[in-house]
Amino acid sequence: MPRHLLKLSDLAPAEARQIVLRASALKRQADSGYRPFVGKTLAMIFTKNSTRTRVSFEAGMARFGGHALFLAAGATQIGRDEPLRDTAQVLSRMCSAVMIRNDSQRDQEEFAAHSRVPVINGLSDLHHPCQLLADLQTWFEHRGDPRGKVAAWIGDGNNVCHSFIEAATLFGFTLRIAAPAGYQPDAAVMGAAGDAAQLADSPAAAARGADLIVTDTWTSMGQEAEQQKRLQAFAGYQVDAALMQLAKPDAIFLHCLPAHRGEEVAAEVIDGPQSLIYDEAENRLWAQMALLEFLFGIAA
């Protein structure tokens, strides 16, 4: 049976740590001529727009000798209601792995159930595990092992937040979450994390003494009609210089991008010295290549 990554908790703690550390090793040996993916093809199914997810997977496959196929759902038979199980069985006879970026975790699970090859969640309504592998790689590279440390999530309890919750359990850090009523993370995801994830009363309570501050857009793809409602709900949840000052002096700031300066984060923070957003974005490349190497069963 193939290994899939549909949510971060599909990995054991030791496996997640192995992938993150391996990503940094691949980054250090970028010009070594290492080509582990020769002859391998990654099918990439997109029903949602993408910059970092598409480019990082496509560039990574090319860098390591493989090939990536961009499949816009509207230009395939998936867009004409071909059953997912049929598409899964066909693509997995032709390709080495499949990455899916869509609105439905359930559809990804159905696809994976009928696939002969690894299936990777490139983003769904509930999880964004590849982003968290890159985020943890960035944290390791700049501040060392996050075990025993504190991260503060400020804003929408969305798919990235859910993956951060699972990361807290896998990597042994505490995640404090400040989200307004009606926008808090899924109760089941929170419940599975136990004491690793905690709801804070306010952004200040979450940020105080934290090692890492992280946020995301208040209005994600597909939620544009809710923008004004969300702007009102998230008033007071901006990550600004005053909030960063409550964290530890060497705290870092992360954001998965795209960002809206002046909404969820002030320009002085995202463009300031504590921000690691561009290292974080680059690490999507290395973390995903380490992930593919792991799912392909290639020995490091």
Image (cartoon, rainbow, N blue to C red):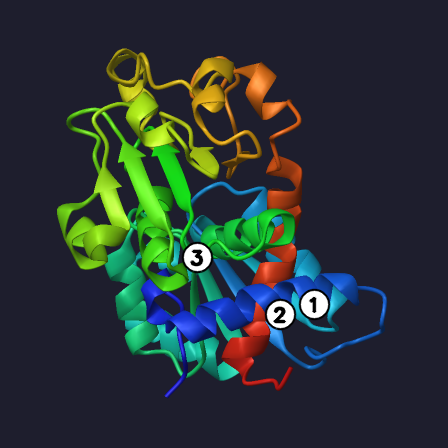
Location of mark 3 (residue):
147
Asked whether, in this view, residue 22 is left or right of residue 120, the answer is right
Q: Is residue 158 visible from the viewing direction of this image?
A: no
Q: Measuring from the top left, give residue 262's x and y in whole percent.
A: 49, 12
Residue density around tag 2, few if under 14, some if 14–19, many if 20 or more, within 10 Å? many
User: Decide: marks 1, 3 in contact (CB < 8 A)?
Assistant: no
Examine the rendered structure and indicate whether residue 19 appears above or below residue 77: below
Mark nearer the viewer, 1 or 3: 3
User: Between marks 1 and 2, how big is the CA–CA gap?
Assistant: 5 Å
User: Between marks 1 and 3, how big is the CA–CA gap?
Assistant: 20 Å
User: Which numbered marker is on residue 189?
Assistant: none
- Check disc 1 and give the amino acid type: Ala
For the image shown, how many numbered marks are present on the structure? 3
User: Between marks 3 and 2, how big is the CA–CA gap?
Assistant: 18 Å
Q: Secondary structure at mark 2?
A: helix
Q: Between disc 3 and disc 2, whose residue precedes?
A: 2
Which residue appears at 48% of the width and 53% of the height? Answer: 146
Which residue appears at 40% of the width and 53% of the height? Answer: 148
Examine the rendered structure and indicate whether residue 137 appears above or below residue 224: below
- Check disc 2 and give the amino acid type: Arg
Q: Give the camera-side residue of 275 and 116.
A: 275
- Give the image quarter of residue 114: bottom left
Q: Secondary structure at mark 1?
A: helix
Asked whether, in this view, residue 7 is left or right of residue 135, the answer is left
Q: Between disc 1 and disc 3, whose residue precedes?
A: 1
User: Which numbered marker is on residue 25?
Assistant: 1
Q: Measuring from the top left, give residue 8's x and y in whole percent.
A: 37, 62
User: Decide: marks 1, 2 in contact (CB < 8 A)?
Assistant: yes
Q: Measuring from the top left, give residue 64's x and y in whole percent.
A: 73, 70
Quadrant in which the N terminus is drawn: bottom left
User: Which numbered marker is on residue 22?
Assistant: 2
